[in-house]
Amino acid sequence: MKAIRVQQFGGPEVMQLKNVPEPSPGPTQVLVHIRAIGINPVETYLRSGSNPNLPLPYTPGTDAAGEVAALGALVRHLKPGARVYTSGSVTGTYSTVAICEAVDVHLLPEKISFAEGAALNIPFATAYRALFQRARAVPGETVLIHGASGGVGTAAIQLARAAGLSVIGTAGSEKGEQLARSLGAGHVLNHRRPDYLADLMKLTENRGVDIILEMLANANLGKDLGVLARNGRVIVIGCRGKVEIAPRDAMTRDADIRAMLLANASDADKASIHAALRAGLENGTLKPVIRLELPLAQAARAHELILEPGALGKIILLP
Ligand code: NAP
């Protein structure tokens, strides 16, 4: 089998496609024949050395879609040949095959392609957890998706609209604005324009928004607190540095700053998330947005692209 191997921490070029021995699944595991791989920003942080305790060499990736190739003796909910998507991997998904724990392997509805399946886990599970398990969103509320053009943002628009929330999105490019609008955002603002949050206050008649899903807290958290409605909640999803805030802005609104890491979700929370995603995929309210497909050998290019401005949904690798 072929797999991307990270031999040492560093830039995208440290990822090399290698021949490696094919593993066999343990009793609770599944061998997945991978057809498409989802790229997520966290894989660039880990590759750069954000977690120095990660053993080297390793194969990156948790998100993929493909077919069940072999099953451990204790796995009951899957059959060989089943179309599946993954939400975690023991051996890493930037590969032609991967070993996954059975709890991290989910049936993929027929109408969802492998590329779309690979785009599901981190973006959609994060957006779902942020909206419903952390923000406790209820129909009729207004959510600002601060960074609506990328993987998590495009998922969040779809989940929020399906649940009866009003969505205001932001993007940094005209194409990103169009994408957010096409997915159901009622209003879209450009987060590169100086006065966009003043426009947000006009749109809400100075009330502010009930919920903010924040993709870049180091740039925005201080400003977010000034555009929340009373009892508003900011959910910190993405952050790449420090930020100064005025706590009084939160005090005067009885506002909450809540943060999240998908990896902290309990098994019960994850089961609930994937049940909800399956329902949305089957009833047609959820459909991942694919920006670009690249061969697995171009993993380094995918890591460069995902950190550049101008997000438009997901980048996928094809083995
Ligand atoms: P992505 O696909 O690369 O999208 C990044 C998004 O951030 C784009 O919509 C981008 O918009 C937007 N953005 C750029 N500058 C911004 C600004 N100044 N203000 C607001 N938004 C801005 O990444 P993703 O997969 O959606 O993930 C988003 C962030 O969440 C990343 O930092 C990721 O590491 C993090 N994340 C965290 C968790 C968790 O468990 N906490 C899970 C998943 C992701 P333009 O490109 O259009 O400017």
Image: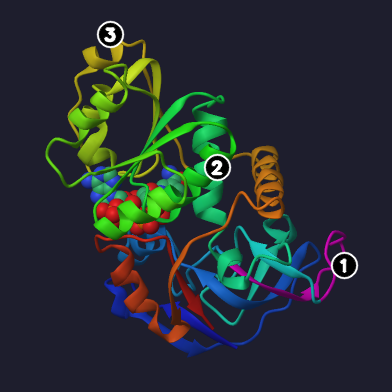
Q: Magenta stretch: residue 69 in it?
A: yes
Query: Toward the viewer: 152 or 218?
Result: 152
Circle 3: element type = loop
Pointer 3 residue: 252
Q: Amino acid at mark 1?
A: Ala
Q: In the rendered view, would you say 50 is above or below 16?
A: above
Ligand 1 closer than 8 Å to label 3 CB: no
* Left-right relation of 216 to 93: left
Mark 2–mark 1 CB contact (< 8 Å) = no
The mark total stands at 3
State the image coordinates of residue 124 (x, y, percent, origin top left): 54, 50
Q: 29 or 156, which is in the foreground?
A: 156
Amino acid found under the numbered disc labelled 3 = Thr
Left/right of residue 246 with respect to residue 8 in the rendered view: left
- CA–CA distance between discs 1 and 3? 57 Å
Q: Which is more N-terminal, label 1 or label 2?
A: 1
Q: CA distance from mark 2 to mark 1?
A: 36 Å
Q: Which mark is first along the chain, 3 or 2?
A: 2
Q: Which mark is residue 310?
A: none
Identify the mark nearer the N-term, 1 or 3: 1
The quarter in which the C terminus is drawn is: bottom right
Q: Is residue 115 above or below residue 140?
A: below
Residue 112 located left or right of residue 252: right
* Residue 306 pos. (x, y %): 33, 65
Picture quadrant where residue 90 is located? bottom right
Query: x, y percentage for residue 132?
Result: 56, 32
Identify residue for label 1: 73
Colour theme = rainbow
Residue tagged 2: 159
Task: Read off the magenta span.
Answer: 64-80
Please tell me in which quadrant of the rendered image residue 272 appears: top right
Q: Residue furthest bottom?
A: 19
